[in-house]
Image (cartoon, rainbow, N blue to C red):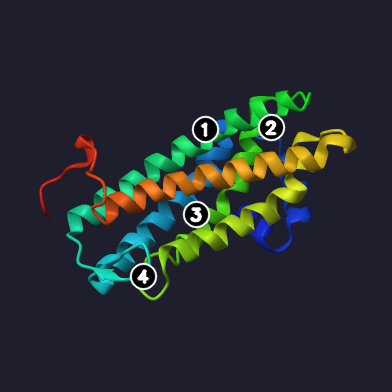
Amino acid sequence: MYRSLMLLFTPMTGWQKIANQSWHVLVVFLFSISPIMVASCAVEGWAMLKFGAGKGPFGNLIELEPSRILSYEILQLALGIVLLFAGGKFVQWVCGGFQTEATYRQSFTLTAYGLTPVFWLRFLDGLPAIPTWICWALAAIAIMVVLYHGVALILQPSTSIGFGLYLVSSASLVALSGIAHFVATGILTEQFDLPAFLKMAPL
């Protein structure tokens, strides 16, 4: 968690430490990323329960059942996991398109740490005063900033293609996170139906 927070303030130093650690994919996920995911979902859900309402897509208040909030946070976790592992594979494919050899460990490490702004901004997303898409937009900007040094230090592309690889990788991860947020928000605001496995009796 400490290294992911460092990326928001001193990205170069943070990425250097991450590059030097060379952790396995599961170690990165279990010990660096999943604690932030779980904590941010817990705080967001608690804030929704505390204030007695959730947010619509543009900050309007809507009444929510506790069971729906719980289902929403479970969905957030599930989408986050898919985003991390599928996003890592997608970045690896992008590297191949730029004639850059990258292992899945490298691609996943870049993706996982690069997406941590989404999870950190989620701590604010339960506050009714802050529209949910503002939180996501701030996270998207932070992803672009954080990945600028990450692509160079983790993937180590040649100088001639480094900036292009950064643009495609960062834009792809921002787009994927936006799709995930759109789906989760749509389910929260009842624009979409809950998946069957998330439907629960009212708490």
Instruction: Name the residue type under label 3.
Output: Phe
Distance Cα–Cα, label 1 vs label 4: 30 Å
SS under mark 1:
helix
Q: Residues within 10 Å of mark 4 (few under 14, many from 20)?
A: some
Q: Earlier in the sequence, mark 1 or mark 4?
A: 4
Q: Secondary structure at mark 3?
A: helix
Estimate the spatial distance between the alpha carbons at disc 2 and disc 3, rounded to whole Å. Answer: 20 Å
Q: Amino acid at mark 2?
A: Gln
**For the image shown, how many numbered marks are present on the structure?**
4
Q: Distance from label 2 to label 4 (Cα)?
A: 37 Å
Location of mark 1 (residue): 85
Q: Position of residue 51 (x, y in %)?
A: 27, 73
Identified at 69% across, 64% down, the residue is: 9
Q: Residue 59 — which label?
A: 4
Dividing the picture into quadrants, the one containing residue 58 is bottom left
Among numbered discs 2 and 1, the one appearing first in the sequence:
1
Q: Residue at x 20, y 62 (%)?
A: 64
In the figure, residue 160 lies in which quadrant? Answer: top right
Q: Residues within 10 Å of mark 3 (few under 14, many from 20)?
A: many
Say which amino acid is labelled 1: Phe
Q: Are marks 4 and 3 in contact (CB under 8 Å)?
A: no
Q: Which residue is mark 2?
A: 106
Residue type at mark 4: give it. Gly
Give the foreground label among 2 and 4: 4
